[in-house]
Image (cartoon, helix red, strand yellow):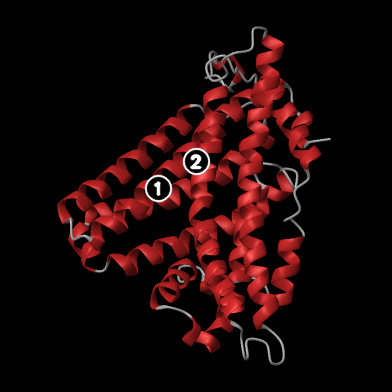
Amino acid sequence: MTWMNDFKTEDFAPFAYLTTRRDLAYYEISEKEGFLDSLKATNKKEEWKSGVLELEHLQTENIRFLQKHLPLASNHLNYILDIHMDVEHQRLKSYQSFAASPDTHWRSWRKHSIQRAREEMKLERDQLGRLADLMDYGDARLKPGMLIYRLLDFLILVADKLGEHSDLLSLDERLKLRALVQPYFKSVRAKGRLEAQKKVEELINIDHSRIKEWAVVFVDKSNADFSNVIYGPKTKAAIKDRGIQQLYALSMAVNENLATTYRHIKWISDNFYGPNKGQNLTADVEEQLHSAIEEITSGFNNYNLTQLDYNMFLASIVPPLESRAWLKS
């Protein structure tokens, strides 16, 4: 039984409305922040400054929107939202700093953006542990966030071994790996490669039945409405069934992307750790190494995109709050 069953619909639906919009804004703003790197690389300073100001504005509006509807009737659900709000305020603080002195941050953008990412990753990872105590450990919306950090732990410890075989990697491959791990390498929680792998394997298996159960309960508890996103079926029941299948498919896409990324990290671990591993490699193994690095970097880059698709759909099916009767006065 999912944790959502502990709440009445009138309590959970406002929470679903706020968190789906918070999560969508989180990934949309993350994509916009990533675009600043491209503007810096192409020396488009004025566009970059405009982008920094936009980040501050969007984050301010996101927080204002959330605070407008708080607190909720359920203290338990308020605690969960409070945890999310800590991350939102941390982001805003960083964006305000960027906007207050854009010239300073422009000159050393790489350093400042990495520092911002490190601060957020540390806070977010700590907060995920708190969320796991308030939600199901394998909740379909919580699990990917926990898993992505465990994958980063594993990748960093595996990539460290690849340093002994740097002659096998192209400059582009080394730069791609560095870009992935540099903001995070000081935050590794696992004590070693095997522990990191074990922690990934605690979450990596995809439980299809549990994801389907989650989708059914979430739809009911959030008062989800598929009428604006599902076309074709003639009856409400058929529309709902199709909508649940779409929600399940999008959740699966997030999980499958992470599972594929893990398989490639594990392949490198299996082939380059241990006595005489990584020695006298055949051309086929070297080719697989290049392919694995490409798949790993694509997997982490695609994580935000799969989450963006998933959260766009979620935000489109949870109706807005029509009455503040659900909220505390």
**In the rendered image, which quarter contains the C terminus?**
top right
Q: Quadrant of residue 272?
A: bottom right
Instruction: Assess whether mark 1 and mark 2 are in contact (beta carbons under 8 angstroms).
Output: yes
**In the rendered image, which quarter contains the N terminus?**
top right
Residue at left 30%, top 51%? 96
Q: Quadrant of residue 229?
A: top right
Q: Secondary structure at mark 2?
A: helix
The amino acid beneath tag 1 is: Glu
Residue at left 50%, top 83%? 168
C-alpha separation, residue under disc 2 versus residue under disc 1:
9 Å
* Image spot of residue 324 (x, y percent): 54, 16
Q: Which mark is residue 223?
A: none
Q: Which mark is residue 308?
A: 2
103 lies left or right of 65: left
Farthest-out residue, right: 1
The amino acid beneath tag 2 is: Leu
Q: Is residue 266 above or below residue 8?
A: below
Closer-to-camera residue (118/277): 277
* Image spot of residue 244 (x, y percent): 68, 26
176 lies left or right of 140: left
Q: Which mark is residue 31?
A: 1
Q: Is residue 51 above or below residue 271?
A: above
On the question of residue 192 being in view, the answer is no
Task: Tell me which label, 2 or 1, sits earlier in the chain.
Answer: 1
Q: Secondary structure at mark 1?
A: helix
173 lies left or right of 128: left
Farthest-out residue, top: 234
Q: Is residue 81 above or below residue 288?
A: above
Closer-to-camera residue (299/113): 299
Closer-to-camera residue (174/139): 174
Residue at left 25%, top 62%? 41
* Image spot of residue 237 (x, y percent): 71, 12
